[in-house]
Image (cartoon, coloured by chain):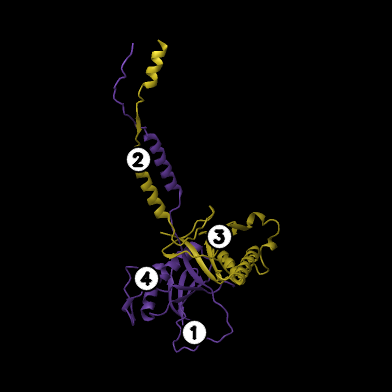
Chain colours: A yellow, B purple
Amino acid sequence: MSTGRSLRRRFRKKTKTSFDVDITSLLDILVILLVFLLKSYNTTGVLYTIPKEISLPQSESQTPTQNGIVIQVSKKSIWVDDKKIYSTDKKDIDKEIYYSENQEEIIPLYDELVKKREQIQQIEQTTEDAQKFTGLVSLVIEKSLMYSDIKKVMATCANAGFMKFKLSVNSF
Amino acid sequence: MYKTPSRRKKKNVLVRPNLTSLLDAIFIFIFFLLFSSDLKSLFEIPVDIPILSEKEAPPSKKVPLGLTLKINNNSLDLYSGTPLKIIKSIKSEEKNKFNTEELHKTLVQIKKENKTEKSIIINPIIDIPYEGLIKILDNIRYFRNTDESIFIKDPINGDVRIKELFNKIIFENIKS
């Protein structure tokens, strides 16, 4: 009879299923992840995005990085705070646009640095707790570049009012 | 016909999903993250450039050492005093491969006689690669654990071991 079967179905007790997940190995992974994060954690809070074209020289220096304007120099390009301001790809347009008369100064770099300095000084004047202009630049330079190239970058920085330099290096 | 309700016991079915393959995938992902990330820490070498000032230098009885390192084609030349007098010339056999060990030893000896001096002027006469320049700076800045210990008298802590060799680096000719 169909009515008897439906009653039986209605009163049939449901079997209880309990869900149990073994998370032991998951915790192992989390521990590895935690170790990785702790190892790569930088207490100075200064983060650099280094372009692929730049490989830094290795050094024994243990001086931690500081906040400042970051100038990155590769064989072909120059960046100021991650903004590309010079590239040799454009060099064929007019070489004179990029160098001063005595070939010691890189004009786009100088212009950008002056702009940065003025911005910082303006903020300094209008805001009470603003960081003061220190004239500090961090130089992230490709290791195969020659001293004559670095000298041009440093001379341009000095002319733009940035007189303190930090040479960024990789630790051994 | 009435049938008494059954008193069948509840069945507790334990469902254990097989996570092995999922965890394997997560492991591979973590290894990928570890290998693709650059774990090398960034450090800095502070350098200065000379600043021209119209003000007169403060009077001091102490004669400045004026330690200067000139990097030439085949030698590292150390000078001091005003006017500059050569202290030592460290020759190298190959171009751009300098005897930095000898330079370090010489600077340790100079530091022994001038314990409070921290500055050195760097003057690369030739065009050297940046990597080579950093190697020279490394040998100038700090004492090594294997170096002879040099102590300085401190009024509070007594004898204090000096860790820095010539850590204040000034580049001389950036505009020439």
Q: CA distance from mark 4 to mark 2?
A: 50 Å
Side (left or right) of B118 relative to A122: left
Location of residue B38 with respect to B14 vertically, above or below: below
Which is more N-terminal, label 3 or label 2? 2
Name the residue furthest front: B2
- Image marks 1 and 4: residues in contact by CB distance under 8 Å: no
The residue beneath circle 3 is A72
* Mark 3 residue type: Gln
Discs 3 and 1 lie in a common subunit = no
Discs 2 and 3 lie in a common subunit = yes
Which is closer to the viewer, label 4 or label 2?
A: 2
Location of residue B132 in the rendering, given as x and y in whole percent from the top left corner: 47, 63
Instruction: Write down the quadrant of residue A78 in the picture.
Output: bottom right
Location of residue A157 in the rendering, given as x and y in whole percent from the top left corner: 59, 68
The residue beneath circle 1 is B82
Depth check, front residue: B145 or A42: A42
